[in-house]
Image: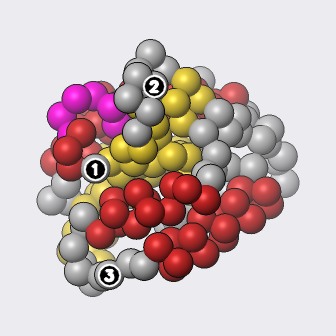
Amino acid sequence: MTTYETMPFHLETDRLILRPWVESDAAEFCALLSERGGKTYTVEHVRTSVAEMLTATATTGIALLPIVRREEGDFIGYCGLIIGRSTLEEPEIAYELFRRVHGRGYATEAAGAVLDAAAATGRRRLWSTVGAWNTPSLRVLDKLGFERDHVSTEDNGEVVWLTRSLP
């Protein structure tokens, strides 16, 4: 089995800071998850999820990181690497941002930093799975050089599987 370097857990871009979770992120994270509609999340439930993510990060060496705007200092979403539908060797890149900040290039900027961090771990390939309806996310992945691999059908509809080789 190949061993990989631990992913850096503090990433910075011109406009964004991606950093480890802190307890005070729970309320904002809860609000972000609630934007999806459907399931209701409580701050307590989200706090437990954050603790589980931190534990998983210690084991896997990869992380989903909160995104904070450098100038405003506000939590706007998350981006990082997860096992998701994939593997630790070839993890998925995942991101989600508040609707109020969509269309400003933040997802592309954050995901670009995560791609560099993934490459620094020694990994050769990443995956992403996105609902076929999610045109904005598919556009972000296209800008980052991801290519469609296949489409699967799940309970909530079609899922597009994309992959990207790392340098």
Amino acid type assigned to the residue bearing label 2 in the image: Arg
Amino acid type assigned to the residue bearing label 3 in the image: Thr
Residue behind mark 2:
70
Q: Are the residues flagged by discs 1 and 2 in contact, CB closer than 8 Å?
A: no
Q: Residue at 37% across / 44% down in the picture?
A: 76
Regarding mark 3 in the picture, which secondary structure is present there?
Answer: loop
> In the drawing, what numbered circle is on residue 40?
3
Most foreground residue, 113 or 49: 49
In this image, 29 relative to 131: left or right?
right
Q: Quadrant of residue 109?
A: top left
Q: Residue at 77% across / 41% down in the picture?
A: 6
**Labels 2 and 3: the sequence-earlier one:** 3
Q: Answer yes or no: is residue 112 visible.
A: no
Q: Residue at 38% across / 78% down in the picture?
A: 41
Residue behind mark 1:
98
Q: Are the residues flagged by discs 2 and 3 in contact, CB closer than 8 Å?
A: no
Extreme-top residue of the structure? 14
Q: Answer yes or no: is residue 21 visible.
A: yes
Mark 1 residue crowding within 10 angstroms, few (<14) / some (14–19) / many (20+): some
Specify the segment rendered in magenta.
102-108
Q: Distance between the Cα atoms at labels 1 and 2?
A: 16 Å
Regarding mark 1 in the picture, which secondary structure is present there?
Answer: loop
Q: Distance between the Cα atoms at labels 2 and 3?
A: 30 Å
Q: Position of residue 93 (x, y in %)?
A: 48, 47
